[in-house]
Amino acid sequence: MRYAIEVAYDGTNYCGWQIQPNGMTIQQRLQEAAAAAFGTVCTVTASGRTDSGVHASGQVCHLDLPCEIPGERLADALNAHLPEDIGVLRSARAYDGFDANRSAKRKTYRYSLYFSPRRNPLLDRYATRVDAPCDEGALSGAAALFTGVHDFAAYCSSGSQVKTTVREIYGISLSRREGLLDIYVCGGGFLYNMVRTMVGTMLWHSLGKLSLEDISASLREGRRSLVGKTMPAKGLTLVRVEYSPDPFEAVR
């Protein structure tokens, strides 16, 4: 029986999503929780991998269990065996053919910044400090260049193995909350470090280090020298993954 789960986690102490031999990961913790709860080994598949230190408030996963339980009870069964920095927010029996990765239509990430000459420990765990004033209008102007279908070859880490570096960005928006500036990026899919490099490029433009033409040229020509720095992982959160139909609504 296949189940869908929505998971939130603080990625600070983890080596990303995917199981690896050199450190603890979110996937490993979830699979250990499933083994403890149901006495069976299973694979927990996510909508996509998050990197070391990246957080999630709405990661969606699926897992197959040999037993049948009410879908809504799975969350509590897993949470009983998870650490405090990982939690299953909701769970449901998945509809036939649902795959958390392949069925995903859109993903929304949030990158959070705060502007201060000194580090604020109440903000610093989930946001990146910028010690210079920022022109929000310039940020928005740079963001507009990323919207649509582009080749983001210049915005992924070297050595990334993907079939194509072309991706579609549906929209980028800015929002203020409690001393933070949040940048929301919604797209059909993302390359390794893509969002963090896009935000770094937007920030460099707002600080006068890159022109709009530099950014346009980086998309046309794939030149890494025309983009900003890759921002730290701690400021990035996977906020939402969208499906049609919604796995938490389609089967009751």
Image (tube, grey):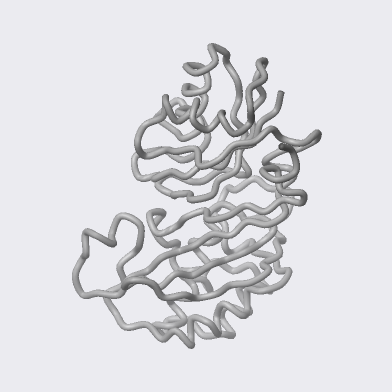
Q: Which corner quadrant of the image does residue 95 belong to?
A: top right
**Residue at x 48% of width, y 49% of height:** 56
- Is residue 217 visible from the viewing direction of this image? yes
**Residue at x 72% of width, y 61% of height:** 166
**Residue at x 47% of width, y 16% of height:** 36
User: In front: 46, or 150?
Assistant: 46
Rendered-image quadrant of the N terminus: top right
User: In front: 49, or 247?
Assistant: 247
**251 up-or-down from 165: above or below:** above
How many numbered discs, if any? 0
**247 up-or-down from 24: above or below:** below
Q: Is residue 191 left or right of residue 179?
A: right
- Residue 55 is situated, as x and y percent measured from the top left of the image, at 44, 49
Q: Which corner quadrant of the image does residue 128 belong to?
A: bottom left
User: In front: 245, or 100?
Assistant: 245
- Residue 78 is situated, as x and y percent measured from the top left of the image, at 49, 27
Q: Is residue 75 left or right of residue 2?
A: left
Q: Which corner quadrant of the image does residue 65 belong to?
A: top right
- Residue 83 is situated, as x and y percent measured from the top left of the image, at 36, 32
**218 up-or-down from 186: above or below:** below
Considering every residue shown, the one lying at the far top of the view is 39
Considering every residue shown, the one lying at the far right of the view is 96
Q: Is residue 161 left or right of residue 157?
A: right
